[in-house]
Image (cartoon, rainbow, N blue to C red):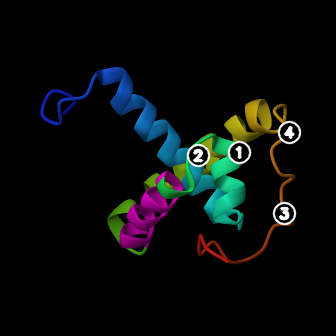
Amino acid sequence: MARRINHTLHAVERYIHTFCRVVFLARKGFHPLQIALTVGISSGGTRTFLDIYEAHRHRKAYQRRFQEIDLIGAQHYEAEDLKKGGPLPRPETSSTSGRP
């Protein structure tokens, strides 16, 4: 895939990792600006990742992957983002809509 889009494997892995972090925080109810600051990307980049997520979040085929993103994201958030002064987790809610 990396060759097909003329990107390095490292760049593609970074995009996927960043997408997972953005989706995790969105599913926890964080505001896009908080997500951008926590992840360290632009607001426009955050919006692009959120648009991709919104376009696919209701597709049944991706639900298992989004659950995996939640698990991986929680581990990364606790290990890295909180150390960097990321926003404190919001109380759990029954909604995982992704956007407030």
Sequence-wise, which precedes: disc 4 or disc 3? 4
Cβ–Cβ under 8 Å for marks 2 and 1: yes
Instruction: From the viewer's side, name the closer residue of 68 and 9.
Output: 9
Cβ–Cβ under 8 Å for marks 4 and 1: no
Disc 2, SS:
helix
Sequence-wise, which precedes: disc 1 or disc 3? 1
Instruction: From the viewer's side, name the closer residue of 52 and 75.
Output: 52
Q: Quadrant of residue 49?
A: bottom left
Q: Which mark is residue 13?
A: none
Q: Amino acid at mark 1?
A: Thr
Does residue 25 lie above or below 72 as drawn? Answer: below
Q: CA distance from mark 2 to mark 4?
A: 15 Å
**Of helix, strand and loop, which mostly describes the magenta segment?**
helix
* 6 relative to 13 in the view: left or right: left
Q: Is residue 43 magenta?
A: no
Q: Residue at x 34, y 32 (%)?
A: 12
Q: Would you call the spot at circle 2 few (<14 residues within 10 Å), some (14-19), or many (20 or more)?
A: many
Q: Amino acid at mark 4?
A: Gly
**What x and y, as percent, mark residue 81?**
76, 37
Sequence-wise, which precedes: disc 4 or disc 1? 1
Disc 1, SS:
helix
Sequence-wise, which precedes: disc 2 or disc 1? 2
Write down the region rendered in magenta: 45-57
Q: CA distance from mark 2 to mark 3?
A: 16 Å
For label 4, the residue is 85
For label 3, the residue is 90
